[in-house]
Image (cartoon, grey):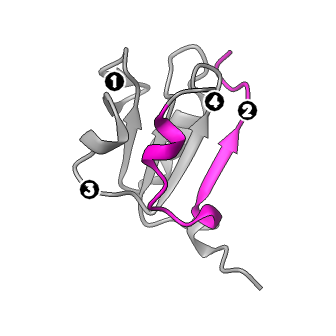
Amino acid sequence: MPDVRALILPRSVAVVGASPRNPAAVETVVRSGVPAWGVSPTHAEVAGLRCYTTIADLPEQPETAAFLAGDLVGSAAPAEAAPQPRSRRWWRPRAGS
C-alpha cells in the first residue's frame, strides 16, 4: 500500500498556480499552518501566501506540490516538480480557470 501521509499531512506544500481568481485552495493551505509557498509567475502574494516565480525559486523543496492547473497546462511546472515522487503531487485540473 502506498504511503499517503505526505498527501494527507504534508510537512510542507508548494501551491503551483496560486491565483487570486481561485483562492480557496491557497486559503486552506495558509490556515493549516504547514510551511507553504505559492508558485505564480504573475503574483507576489495570494491570500497571504508568498509566491515565487518558479518551483526552482522556492527556499526549500516542498514535500508535496499541489497543482492548480488552469494556466499551467503545457507549462514546465510539472517537470520542475519531478524530483518529488508521483505519490506526493496533487493535480487539480482547471482550478483557477
Count numbered badges in the picture. Answer: 4
Circle nearer the N terminus (3, 1)? 1
Report the amino acid beneath label 4.
Ala
Q: Are marks 2 and 3 in contact (CB under 8 Å)?
A: no
On the rendered structure, is 60 left or right of 13? left
* Residue that badge 2 annotates: 93
Q: What stretch is highlighted in magenta?
A: 76-97
Q: Residue at x 70, y 38 (%)?
A: 92
Q: Do the residues labelled 4 and 2 touch (CB within 8 Å)?
A: yes
Circle nearer the N terminus (2, 1)? 1
Category of crowding for the residue at label 2, using alpha-carbon neighbours closer than 10 angstroms: few (below 14), some (14–19), many (at least 20): some
Separation of marks 2 and 3 at Cα, in angstroms: 25 Å
Report the amino acid beneath label 3.
Glu
- Report the disc number at residue 66: none
* Residue 35 percent location from the top left of the image: 35, 54
- Foreground mark, 3 or 1, reads 3
- Foreground mark, 2 or 1, reads 2
Circle nearer the N terminus (1, 4)? 1
* Residue that badge 1 annotates: 45
- Report the disc number at residue 60: 3
* Residue that badge 4 annotates: 69
Report the amino acid beneath label 1.
Glu
Separation of marks 2 and 1 at Cα, in angstroms: 21 Å
* Quadrant occupied by the N terminus: bottom right
Q: Residue at x 55, y 66 (%)?
A: 85
